[in-house]
Image (tube, rainbow, N blue to C red):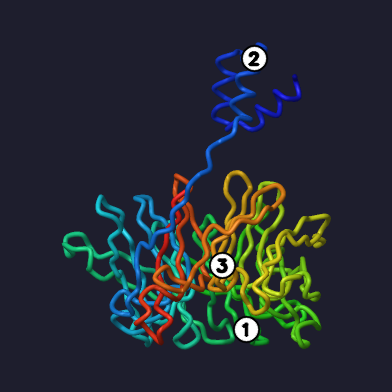
């Protein structure tokens, strides 16, 4: 009976457990135990889920082809970037505001090329000061920028453009082509990121910007230690940085290497690099484009766009076993049958330890999907399979949750199929659970 009770209590939400024990003052009667056990193990009705499109990009002033995911503000509005189109022809930052009649779309800023930059691949994020920050891939070698809203007194509608400030313009030796990665902030407001190319060996950099925009190159990749980092960085509790490189690290993948997972450790004003995993065997996955996330135990999770036993990418876990020594475990192999179909966007973990993400061209129709890997056995479920019709297709974004557990993201193509070359300009979507 005791074991059954423990199992039942383990299945209850923490809030229910707290309420139960507070009211029983630590004394659990057999009758109460049976009630709790029956509640915990009783079959629960299956949760229905619904896919819906919140916005379809037209290739007009709203932009088109969103490669990055979305960001919440404190009021429950969504922010994102579109890689192309817009009133200036070079991409947009937009906002979706939720109201009684649905979601209202408004472009906040449009690039026209030149010194302001162009073609954002990464999403915008809020800094510690409450201002939006992001990167562009063009002019000349990319920029880091922030956006501020117009003064309330000067703007009476949702259509007033925001003001861009370019904090840094890359010049190849200090970096070139910021990719898909979010910017990262420390407690002092310093900004950290990666560039896919540039640096002393032209194979990518990790950089730091002060709040005023002064840049320092923390590390330049040389090939054997990795090359072309496509995504962003994360901190651990000690202040070390972690990330991935899509290529480099060894002799696999036609001699250029199949990618790495790395750690950068600060000491005496310098940063020391440590390779945690070196992708050489196609069965382990190749080309980790996605960034990394930690679980509560200090394990790392990420994804590759290719390789694996299905030839279409993997989801992996890295477990620390010692200083600069980690063990790689493949949690899932995608089975699209080849190509670079796996996760481009960084995974996300919910409070139960389940992993969520998107694939670019896996899924039932080969147009990408939204998936879940359920802890602890990492059972795979496709939550939605895109058709590249009005629902969108080929997502490269991460996903985010709202307080009710609904999922949000973008798809790079599909939607309005008259947009662009006939593949569509993408959508913003929601999965209600």
- Closest to the observer: 245 or 170? 245
Q: Disc 3 and disc 2: Cα gap in Å?
A: 46 Å
- Asked whether residue 27 is in view, the answer is no
Q: Secondary structure at mark 3?
A: loop
Q: Which of the marked residues, 3 or 2, is nearer the chain's N terminus?
A: 2
> Which residue lies under the disc numbered 1?
199
Q: Position of residue 219 (x, y in %)?
A: 66, 75
> Which residue lies under the disc numbered 3?
345
Tag 3–tag 2 contact (CB < 8 Å) = no
Q: Position of residue 185 (x, y in %)?
A: 52, 61
Q: Secondary structure at mark 2?
A: loop
> Which residue lies under the disc numbered 2?
26
| Label 1, residues with CA under 10 Å away: few <14, some 14-19, many ≥20 | many
Q: What residue is rendered at 60% in x and 65% in y?
A: 233
| Label 3, residues with CA under 10 Å away: few <14, some 14-19, many ≥20 | many
- Asked whether residue 340 is in view, the answer is yes
Q: Secondary structure at mark 1?
A: loop
Tag 1–tag 3 contact (CB < 8 Å) = no
Corner quadrant of residue 29 = top right
- Closest to the observer: 265 or 51? 51
Q: Quadrant of the N terminus?
A: top right
Q: Disc 1 and disc 3: Cα gap in Å?
A: 24 Å
- Closest to the observer: 75 or 286? 286
Q: Is residue 25 above or below residue 56?
A: above
Q: Nearer the viewer, mark 1 or mark 2?
A: 2
Q: What residue is rendered at 68% in x and 71% in y?
A: 313
């Amino acid at each position: 009976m005791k074991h059954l009770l423990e199992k039942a209590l383990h299945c209850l939400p923490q809030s229910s457990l707290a309420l139960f024990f507070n009211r029983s003052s630590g004394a659990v009667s057999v009758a109460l135990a049976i009630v709790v056990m029956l509640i915990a193990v009783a079959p629960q009705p299956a949760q229905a889920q619904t896919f819906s499109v919140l916005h379809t990009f037209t290739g007009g002033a709203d932009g088109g082809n969103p490669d990055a995911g979305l960001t919440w503000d404190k009021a429950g509005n969504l922010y994102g970037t579109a890689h192309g189109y817009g009133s200036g022809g070079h991409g947009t930052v937009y906002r979706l505001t939720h109201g009684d009649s649905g979601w209202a779309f408004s472009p906040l800023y449009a690039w026209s090329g030149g010194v302001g930059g162009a073609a954002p691949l990464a999403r915008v994020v809020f800094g510690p000061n409450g201002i939006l920050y992001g990167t562009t891939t063009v002019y000349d070698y990319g920029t880091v920028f922030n956006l501020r809203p117009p003064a309330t007194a000067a703007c009476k509608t949702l259509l007033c453009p925001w003001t861009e400030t370019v904090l840094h313009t890359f010049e190849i030796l200090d970096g070139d082509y910021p990719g898909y990665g979010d910017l990262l902030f420390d407690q002092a407001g310093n900004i950290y990121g990666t560039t896919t190319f540039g640096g002393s060996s032209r194979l990518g950099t990790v950089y730091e910007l002060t709040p005023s925009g002064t840049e320092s190159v923390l590390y330049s990749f040389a090939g054997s230690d990795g090359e072309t980092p496509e995504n962003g960085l994360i901190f651990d509790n000690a202040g070390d940085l972690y990330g991935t490189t899509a290529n480099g690290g060894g002799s696999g993948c036609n001699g250029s290497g199949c990618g790495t997972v790395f750690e950068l450790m600060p000491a005496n004003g310098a940063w020391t690099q440590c390779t945690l995993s070196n992708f050489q065997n196609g069965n382990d996955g190749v080309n980790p484009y996605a960034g990394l996330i930690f679980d509560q135990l200090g394990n790392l999770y990420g994804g590759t766009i290719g390789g694996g036993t299905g030839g279409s990418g993997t989801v992996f876990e890295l477990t620390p076993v010692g200083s600069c020594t980690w063990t790689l475990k493949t949690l899932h192999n995608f089975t699209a049958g080849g190509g670079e179909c796996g996760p481009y966007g960084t995974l996300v973990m919910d409070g139960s330890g389940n992993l969520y993400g998107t694939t670019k061209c896996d899924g039932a129709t080969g147009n990408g999907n939204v998936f879940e890997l359920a802890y602890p056995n990492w059972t795979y479920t496709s939550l939605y399979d895109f058709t590249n019709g009005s629902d969108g297709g080929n997502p490269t974004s991460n996903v985010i949750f709202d307080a009710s557990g609904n999922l949000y993201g973008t798809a790079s193509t599909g939607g309005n199929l008259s947009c662009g070359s006939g593949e569509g300009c993408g959508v913003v979507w929601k999965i209600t659970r």
